[in-house]
Amino acid sequence: MADGPVLDGARLTVLAQLESMSIRRLGRLLRHHGVSEAFDRVIDGRVGAEVADEAIRRSWTEAARHVDLSVVRDQLEELEVRVTSWHDEGHPSVLTTDIDPAPVLFRIGEVPPLHLPRVAVVGTRRCSGAGLETAHELGRELAAAGVVVVSGLAIGVDGAAHEGALEAGAAPPIAVVGSGPDVVYPRRHRGLWRRIGEMGCLCTEAPLGAEPAAWRFPARNRLIAALADLVVVVESRVAGGSLLTVEQAIRRGVDVMAVPGSVRNPAADGANQLLVDGCAPARSADDVLLALGLSTVDRVVRRAGGDPLPTGEAAAVLAAIDDGPTAIDEIVARCGLSARAVFAQVEILLGRGHIVADGARVRRS
Amino acid sequence: MLATVPSSTLSGVEGRSVSVEVHVADGLPSFTIVGLPDASCREARDRVRAAIVSTELDWPQRRITVNLAPGDVPKIGAGLDLPIALGLLCASGQLPESSLDDLGAFGELGLDGTIRSVPGALPMVDAVKALRVVVPAADARVTSLIAGSRVRPVRHLRDVTSVLSEGWPWPEVHLDLTPDPVLPVPDLCDVKGQATARTALEIAAAGGHHLLLVGPPGAGKTMLARRLGGLLPDLGRVEALEVTRVHSAAGLPLPPSGLVTRPPFRAPHHSSSMAALVGGGTGRARPGEISAASGGVLFLDELGEFAPSVLDALRQPLEEGVVRVARSGGTHEQPARVILVAAMNPCPCGAGGDIGCRCPPSARVRYSRRVSGPLLDRLDLMIHVDRPAPAALLDRAPGECSAAVAERVMSVRMRSQQRGVRCNADLDDSQLDEHASLDDEARELVAGALAAGRLSARGLRRVRCVARTIRDLDDGEAGLRLGDVATALGMRARPPMGGDRG
C-alpha cells in the first residue's frame, strides 16, 4: 500500500489498544512481521496460534476491522505523539537490543542523543523533605553536567529529580510513564508532564488512552533500567517499587548507587539496605559523575574560585555553622553575636553562596 | 399629641442620629412602632408598658404610634426604650410639654423601670442631637469621656420623671475615679532561650510589623505570641478613644475607667467565620475580631487550620488598616490597625519534613497551600521556633524581662512619631525615600533578591520598613546599612518551597 509508512503509527496504536494486548503478545505479534503485515494478519484472522488464544485472536479481528486508521493518525498528530516499533530506525537502539526489548514506544518530544550519559534517579513516592531536596539537587546538578536524567515522573523522588533537571536547562531529561501519553498521571504533575514533552522526552509503552493500570508499572521500571547507564536510588522503602527498578538494572549489569539516609528514616531503609548489599554510596552529584567516569574538576574549581573567604562577623557566623543543618538559634548560642547580627550575616553568606538554606536551617555549601 | 425625643442607634461602630416621634391619638387602643426596628427594638412596646406601669404612671388607653426617623436606617437594640417612654409620657400629658426641649436619651428599660446599659454607648452618645443626654448610669464614665457635661446619668425612669415634672435636680451619680488596676500580663522573662524569636517579637512590637511563627508543637509559639502585648506602649488618647468606641460597639467589657488604654490582644479560635473575624453578620454590621484588636495584637494560633477564605479576607484590611463591610444600609468602615501574629506548624504532624515526620509530601504541600502566597507576602517577619535546647530549658536564670524590651520599643515608637507616623509599618513610599534610603551594598543585596523573584514590590517596601525599625533599635540614624536590610530580608516570610514538587 502506498500510504503504508504514514499509517504505521496509527496501526501500532490500534494494535496496542486492542483488548488483552499485553506487551509480551505485542512482541510475539511483531517478531516476524512488519507493522502493516502484522496489522493485515489481525484483520484477516491470520495471526499465529503462538501469539494468543483462539478467542482473543477472534476478538482482535473483530475490533481491528471497525477502526478508521486516518482518525487515529489525526489524533496522534494533534497530540504530537510519535510511535515507533522495533523495526523502525527511530526506535531507541538501547530498547531494541535490550534483553526484554520494547516492541513499541509512544513518545512526546525527541529522544536525547544516545551518546549522552543517562542516569536514572528513582525513589519512593512517600519520601521525606530531605529526600525531595536531594532528588531535586541530583537532578539539577547531573543535568547541568550534561547527564540525561531518566525517571518515572511519579510523586516524590521521581518528580523532584525531573523538576531539578528541567531547572538546570542543560541536558534534556527522559520521563518513562505507566499510562498513555495523553493520560496525565499523577494529575498533580500536569505542568511537569507538559514541560518534559517540550524540553525532553516523555515516553511510554502504553497506547493513547491507556489508564495507569498497576501491571504497567513494573514494565515501566524495566524500561527505566534499560535506558539507564546507572541507577541512583534516593530514598526507598524496604519493599518499594524502586527496588524493582534496581532488580531490572542488576539483570542488565547496570550499576546501582544509593543515597545514604538516616537510620531513623523509614523512607530510607531500602536505600540503606542496598548500601549494605554492596552498592556504591551516592552522597552528591559528584559521586555519580565520578562513577560515570566524568570529570568533576570544573565544579571543584568553580566553587574554590568564588568569593573570597568572609571576615569579621561573617567569619564568626560561618564558623558556627556545621556541614549539617544548623538552626539559627544554635548559631546565636555558638557565636555570641546578637540574633539580629546573625540574621544579617546568614542572609549575606547565603547571597554569596558560602552556605545554603535547608528548610528553616542552613548548612555549609 | 405629638412629642419628639432625639436619640441614636448603632450602625457598625458609628452612632446614627435617630429622632423618636410619639403620637397619641383617639381611637381603639393600640401600640405600633414603625421605622425599621429590629426584633429587640420592636419588643420595646412590652418593656415600655411594664416600666411605665411599675413607675406608677398611667398607660394611655389610646392609639399610640411611634415613628423612628429617618425611616431608611435600621434601628438596632433596646437603646430606644427610654426615648420612647419619655416621648409617650410627654405626648400623653404626664410630662410638661417644654420638659423635653433639648433633651435626648437612650437606654434599655427593665420591667420595673430601671435603666440598663446598652452596647455602643460611646459612639451613640456622640450622635444624639441634644444639649443634654440622659444615659444609663452604668454608661456614665464611658459616655462622659467625649460628651462630658452633656451627660445626665440616671438609674431609674422615676429619676427622670421627677426631674422633668417636679423640677428636682438631676441625681448625683458617683463616678469611680480610681485608676484602672494594672492587669498582670505574661512576661518575656519566662521564655527560655529562643534568641531569634525574642528579637522578632521586639522588632514586631517596635515597628508594628506582622509576624509568623512556625515550629513544631510545644516549641513555645503561643507562649511567645502572648507576650507581645506586654511589649507595646500604652495607647495615645485619640487611639484609646477609637479602640474604646469599637469595644463599646462590640459589647466587649470595658475597664472601670471606661477608657481602654492598653493595646487589646485578641485570639479568635481557628473555627471562626469570616463575619466573626472581619465583621458583618446579618442586618447589623458587628465589628469583627480584627476591629476589636485594632490598636493591638490579633493572634491567629494554628493559622493553617483557619478556612482559607477567612484568611484571604484579611488581606485588604491588613493592607489598609480599615475593614469595609458592605450592607444594604450602606458601607461600614471599621478600624483594623493590628499587628497580626500568626502561629502554625510546618506540617500536619509538626515535624516539618525532618526525620520522624509522618506526613507524605502531598499532605505537606496541601498544608502549605492553606496559607495563600498573597497573605504570606503581607507577613513581614517569619521565624522558625524550634524546641529550646535542654540546657536552655533547665537554665534557672530568667531571660530579659518585658519592661526592658518595652523601653526600647517605646524609643523606636517615639522616633516613628517624629516622622509623622504611628509606627514604622505605616511609612509610605515618599517617607521611605526620605527616611529609609539604601546604601550601595544594601541596594545590591535587594537587587539580587528582586531578580531572584524572592521579593515583590510590596515586599521591598515592607523590607525597608522593617530595616528602618532595625536601624531604629540600634541608633536611629538616617539611612539603612547592609546589615539592617539583610536582617529584614532574612526574617521575611518566603512563599512555601516546592509547591509543585513532590
Image: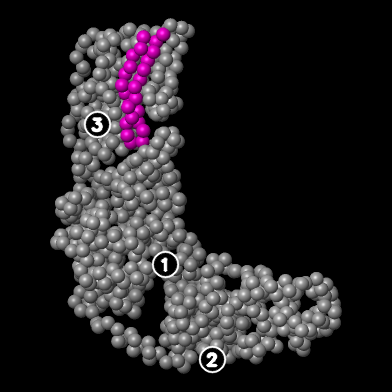
Q: Is residue A174 magenta?
A: no
Image vertical order of residue A56 relative to residue B243, above or below: below
Callout 3: chain: B
Which residue occupies the foreground of this view, B369 or A342? B369
Q: Residues within 10 Å of mark 3 (few under 14, many from 20)?
A: many
Image vertical order of residue B183 relative to residue B453, above or below: above
Assign the N terminus of chain A to one quadrant of the image: bottom right
Q: Residues within 10 Å of mark 2 (few under 14, many from 20)?
A: few
Residue highlighted by disc 1: B497
State the SS at label 2.
loop
Which residue is depicted at the point 19% across and 20% down? B172
Q: Is residue B13 magenta?
A: yes
Residue B121 location (% of width, % of height)? 29, 30
Residue highlighted by disc 3: B142
For badge 2, the amino acid type reads His
Query: For residue A92, what is the image quadrant?
Result: bottom right
Q: Is residue B320 left or right of residue A177?
A: left
User: What kind of secondary structure does the magenta stretch mostly adopt?
Assistant: strand
Image vertical order of residue B203 relative to residue A217, above or below: above
Cα distance between the residues tagged 3 and 1: 50 Å
Q: Is residue A311 left or right of residue A154?
A: left
Residue B436 location (% of width, % of height)? 21, 61
**Would residue B319 be visible to someone looking at this image?**
yes
Cα distance between the residues tagged 2 and 1: 35 Å
Residue highlighted by disc 2: A115
State the SS at label 3.
helix
Q: Is residue B185 left or right of residue B356?
A: left
Using the rendered image, report if marks 2 and 3 lie on a common chain.
Answer: no
Q: Is residue B414 left or right of residue B213?
A: left
Residue B272 location (% of width, % of height)? 42, 45
For badge 3, the amino acid type reads Val
